[in-house]
Structures are given as structure tokens and as C-alpha cells.
Image (cartoon, helix red, strand yellow):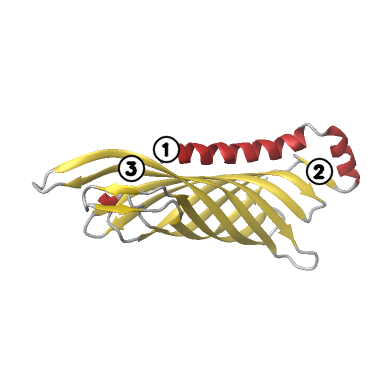
Amino acid sequence: MKKKQLLLIFLVILFLSATAGSFLFAEPEQEQGQKLGITYFSAKSLYFYLLGSFNNFDPPYDNWELGSESSNAFAPVYGVGYRLVNFGNRFFINFEADYAPERYDFRDFVDEQKITTLTFMVDIEWHLRRSPLVFTFGMGAGLFRLHDLGYYDLLDEYVYLGSETITAVTMRFGMKIPISRDILLRGEIRWSGESYGGSYDYYWDEYYGDGEWDYLSSALCFGLEFHL
């Protein structure tokens, strides 16, 4: 599990580095791009967003202490973004990072389970010509921190397991509508999944997983985006 998480993080970082590097070190292409209306790291590229989210989390097979049923939670999302490339004010390539503190109630197992999510994403933004609508698609990595895991054994004694971080691939589809020059309404749907290699559950005496991608979490988000 840890090897796959490290490999996933490495591939995402490699992709982000290659994308940013191609813009930073290609000076002739940048001069030509400016003639075509393409700019890199231009003014007013930084923006922030604050969203409210309705989240669903499905515990992985090896987190049996949370049970086998998914749970829902409302949470705020605090995010920051930066426009890396502007293609004539119609297409943008952005980098975004956001944080969401969530609390789930897994019935008959854990009440008020704290899970914090840290997401890093490369985002493609498309502005329509004759419409104020803006469509977005993003892909990156999500880090799900499961805090203070534990369970009660057969003697009704609590066994503390510590905290655990799950690394997942996260995708997003969204839409924005400007309500002023620097403020936009923003809505999106997120999906996160992890590659699970399988493990043996000694508690239930069963083997789970076959190396396929498993659903982990999803979210429906609405809020505001502020450009500086």
C-alpha cells in the first residue's frame, strides 16, 4: 500500500513539474505564444475559493474499524489557485490546492470520525465565447488523513491504532458563473479512488481486493471564487 501511494505521489509531482517546466524554460515559445495571445504567470493570476461541500466516504477494506458502510458529512473547503497559462482569455491551465475538515458518523462503529482532506490538482478552464458560463476539469492527488483510529475488542477495551493517510487519485468536473469582475459562483463534483492491491482481514477472516481501482470518496461543492 505504501509503495503504491509513494508511486502515485511521484507520478503526480512528475506531471506537475513537467507542465510547469515546459513553460518556464521555453523562452522562444513564450515569445511566440504572446503573439498568439498566450501568456504565462500573468498579473491577477492568484485566486482563492471558499466552498461548502456535501461529502460521501466509503471506508477501504483494510479500515474495518470504521465498518463497511459509507457515511456522509458536510464540510467547508478552503482553497487557493494560480493561473499558469492563459490562452487568449478562453482557455486556462491552473494549479489548485485546498483543505477540507470533515467529520463522519459510521453507525455502530465510530461517532464523529475526523477525516481531513488535502487536494492538489491541475485544472483546465474553458470560457465560452457567447456565454458567461465557464467549464472546468481537474485531476490530481487527494490525501485523506484518518485521525485517531481505534476499536473495542471482545473485552470491551479500547485499542488505539493511531492515524493513517490514504493517497487517492481525484478528478473534478465543474462550472463557474461570474457575478462581478473578480467574483464567481462555483459548483463542482469530485470523485476520488485508490488502487487497492488486496489484503487479508484477520478480524473477519477474509481476503479483500484484487488490485483494481476502488471508490473512496465523492463530493458536491458550491461556493465563491475570489480573484485578486
Nearer-N-terminus badge (3/2): 2
Query: Considering the image in quadrants, where does the C terminus appear?
Result: top right
Nearer-N-terminus badge (2/1): 1
Expressed as whole percent of the image width and height from the top left, the position of residue 144 reads 42, 46
Which residue bears the numbered disc 1? 2
The extreme left residue here reads: 155
As measured in the structure, the alpha-carbon distance from the residue carrying label 3 to the one carrying label 2 is 42 Å
Q: SS for tag 2? A: strand
Q: Residue at x 38, y 53 (%)?
A: 209
Q: Are marks 2 and 1 in contact (CB under 8 Å)?
A: no
**Snapshot quadrant of residue 55:** bottom left
**Residue 147 has which mark?**
3
Query: Looking at the image, is 8 positioned above or below residue 54?
Result: above
Q: Amino acid at mark 1?
A: Lys
**Snapshot quadrant of residue 158:** top left
The residue nearer to you, when weighing 204 against 122, is 204
Q: SS for tag 1? A: helix
Q: Amino acid at mark 2?
A: Thr
Query: Looking at the image, is 103 positioned above or below residue 9?
Result: below
Expressed as whole percent of the image width and height from the top left, the position of residue 201 reads 26, 49
Q: Residue at x 70, y 40 (%)?
A: 19
Expressed as whole percent of the image width and height from the top left, the position of residue 101 reads 41, 48
Which residue bears the numbered disc 2? 39
- 160 vs 209, left or right, is left
Expressed as whole percent of the image width and height from the top left, the position of residue 164 reads 35, 40
Q: Amino acid at mark 3?
A: His
As measured in the structure, the alpha-carbon distance from the residue carrying label 1 to the one carrying label 3 is 17 Å
The residue nearer to you, when weighing 150 against 84, is 150
As measured in the structure, the alpha-carbon distance from the residue carrying label 2 to the one carrying label 1 is 39 Å
Q: Residue at x 57, y 61 (%)?
A: 187
